[in-house]
């Protein structure tokens, strides 16, 4: 009976391994209100080499659904506010919508949730009928049940914080009185179907509107002096307080101990704003989003539920130049429209439990374990203003122990001109990046590298691509 003796340890080992590999990934919102954004295929390629494993979009753009097929990235798609009423009319409009928009793309594209509307109940459009939202959710859920897809695909709807009557203290928070009937129906539906409650939570806007009374560190997801709640909780950052306010409002509806998961469907910080928006800087955006990403990968909960980790979707992937409203609305992106980073945020898998917290620089990491980027169209280049000394060290590393063939950037090579250190570094960094499997962290180079969607080749100087 030797096999049985071996089997148990082996199974235990596999079990432990699977626990180690279970990394809480990071979600991101991929909005497309811009006229200069890269094609969805390139976006999917870029994201595959990062720790982002969930992407939320605001419609069912077929190009995006197609681009994310077989990528291992989960998609949350949406019914636009304007379509909610149509889908609410009867089961056949809901079924037609599903047949036309979703059915052609599954299962190759992993659609895990359909968001019905976005901030529908607090939209300025007073033509929107609140009952239609609940009906549309029920109709689409019935379509999923009929097709046996209701366990894989969840129906929910993202709310703004404005659905709350008050949000402080968190333990005393309730939904706005006029929304109570609708909220009761929605929360009941979510509890019955085991779907999450989604909320878009922006400490940024709260801070912008009250910079004198709110501590910036508290808004920036830092560890500020605790603000006490009468029920004994202490809040060191506003996002926690906002999440717990939503929990209290849900609890106040009287669903007792039925647990409803709260997901932060949007949160972020703009890197630029109008004159009055002094906190909208690249530094603050970097601080907030770095903490947000660390937070969504940690198992940390909130004061009310310390053990329940929070799923978070960062807002947003790109700056969107056609968004209405103030300048900050167009500057929430981690990436600019050309695919370069708006500021430096680490999207490599540094905090994943399967990487043991290694520093991800100079490609000391093997390329196993993470989703690989095998697509044809991303390059790595030096940041234009990166420190020359560091850039020189990067070139020395790449052309030395890094193993890059640097002959093209030496005199008489096709990439010697322009004889500028940043140009030479771009060539060497890209070659290194392509050689090492194009993982995000292979284009870090102590913060001097950036991934780009446009081919840097010129004249006879050809940049490697895989
Ligand atoms: C469903 O609703 C649509 C749009 O309101 C309408 O055109 C259609 O006749 C309805 N179908 C049924 C079966 O009620
Ligand atoms: C209602 O939805 C159906 C199915 O998706 C679609 O064919 C129809 O054009 C929609 N009607 C309106 C008014 O948007
Ligand atoms: C936050 O600050 C307090 C007091 O300075 C400290 O005791 C606590 O460990 C800090 N928490 C974190 C998560 O850094
Ligand atoms: C939830 O509440 C119901 C009714 O109050 C009770 O019967 C049940 O035991 C509770 N379940 C848990 C897990 O606390």
Image (spheres, grey):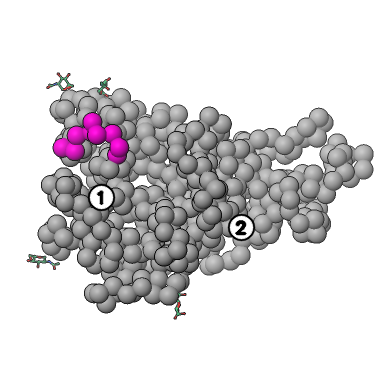
Quadrant of the picture in which ligand 2 is shown: top left
Give the number of the disc on residue 425: none
Q: Is residue 247 left or right of residue 293?
A: left
Residue 376 at least partly seen:
yes
Quarter of the image where one finds residue 133: top left
x 65%, y 60%: residue: 361
Label 1 Cα crowd, 10 Å radius (few <14 / some 14-19 / many 20+): many
Q: Residues within 10 Å of mark 2 (few under 14, many from 20)?
A: few
Cβ at disc 1 under 8 Å from ligand 4? no
The magenta span reads: 123-131
Q: Is residue 324 magenta?
A: no
From the viewer's perspective, tell me whether residue 378 is left or right of residue 218: right
Q: Which residue is mark 1?
A: 163
Q: Which secondary structure, mark 2?
A: loop
Q: Which residue is mark 2?
A: 366
Figure label count: 2
Label 1 or label 2, whichever lies nearer to me, is: 1
Q: Against 67, is 119 above or below?
A: below
The prevailing secondary structure element of the residues shown in magenta is loop
Report how far apart the C-alphas of labels 1 and 2 lie in the structure.
Answer: 47 Å
**126 in magenta:** yes
Q: Earlier in the sequence, mark 1 or mark 2?
A: 1
- The single residue placed furthest to the right in the displayed view is 412
């Amino acid at each position: 009976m030797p096999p049985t003796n071996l089997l148990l340890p082996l199974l235990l080992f596999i079990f432990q391994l699977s626990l180690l590999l279970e990394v809480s990934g990071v979600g991101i919102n991929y909005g497309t209100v811009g006229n200069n954004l890269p094609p969805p295929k390139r976006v999917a390629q870029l994201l595959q080499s990062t720790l982002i494993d969930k992407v939320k979009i605001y419609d069912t753009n077929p190009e995006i659904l197609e681009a994310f097929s077989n990528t291992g990235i989960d998609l949350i798609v949406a019914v636009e506010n304007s379509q909610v009423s149509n889908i609410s009319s009867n089961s056949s409009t809901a079924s037609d919508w599903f047949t036309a928009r979703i059915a052609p793309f599954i299962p190759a594209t992993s659609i895990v949730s359909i968001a019905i509307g976005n901030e529908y109940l607090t939209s300025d459009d007073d033509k929107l009928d609140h009952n239609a939202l609940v009906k549309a959710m029920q109709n689409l859920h019935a379509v999923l049940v009929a097709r046996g897809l209701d366990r894989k695909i969840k129906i929910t709807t993202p709310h703004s914080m404005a659905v709350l009557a008050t949000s402080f203290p968190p333990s005393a928070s309730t939904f706005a009185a006029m929304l109570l009937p609708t909220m009761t129906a929605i929360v009941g539906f979510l509890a019955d179907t085991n779907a999450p409650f989604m909320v878009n939570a922006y400490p940024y806007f709260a801070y912008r509107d009250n910079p004198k009374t709110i501590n910036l560190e508290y808004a920036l997801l830092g560890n500020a002096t605790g603000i006490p709640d009468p029920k004994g909780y202490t809040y060191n950052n506003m996002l926690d307080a906002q999440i717990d306010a939503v929990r209290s409002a849900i609890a106040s509806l009287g669903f007792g101990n039925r647990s409803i998961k709260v997901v932060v469907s949007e949160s972020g910080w703009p890197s630029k704003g109008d004159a009055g928006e002094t906190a909208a800087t690249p530094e603050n955006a970097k601080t907030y989003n770095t903490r947000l990403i660390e937070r969504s990968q940690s198992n940390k909960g909130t004061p009310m539920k310390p053990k329940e980790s929070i799923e978070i979707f960062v807002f947003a992937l790109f700056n969107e130049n056609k968004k209405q409203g103030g300048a900050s609305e167009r500057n929430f992106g981690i990436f600019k429209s050309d695919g370069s980073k708006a500021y430096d945020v680490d999207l490599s898998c540094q905090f994943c439990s399967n990487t043991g917290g290694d520093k991800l620089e100079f490609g000391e990491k093997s390329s196993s374990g993470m989703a690989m980027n095998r697509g044809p169209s991303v390059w790595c280049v030096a940041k234009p203003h990166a420190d020359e000394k560091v850039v020189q060290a990067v070139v020395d590393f790449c052309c030395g122990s890094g193993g890059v063939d640097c002959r093209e950037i030496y005199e008489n090579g096709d990439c010697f001109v322009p004889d500028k250190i940043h140009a030479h570094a771009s060539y060497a960094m890209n070659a290194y990046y392509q050689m090492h499997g194009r993982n995000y962290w292979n284009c870090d180079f102590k913060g001097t590298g950036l991934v780009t969607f446009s081919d840097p080749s010129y004249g006879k100087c050809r940049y490697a691509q895989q």
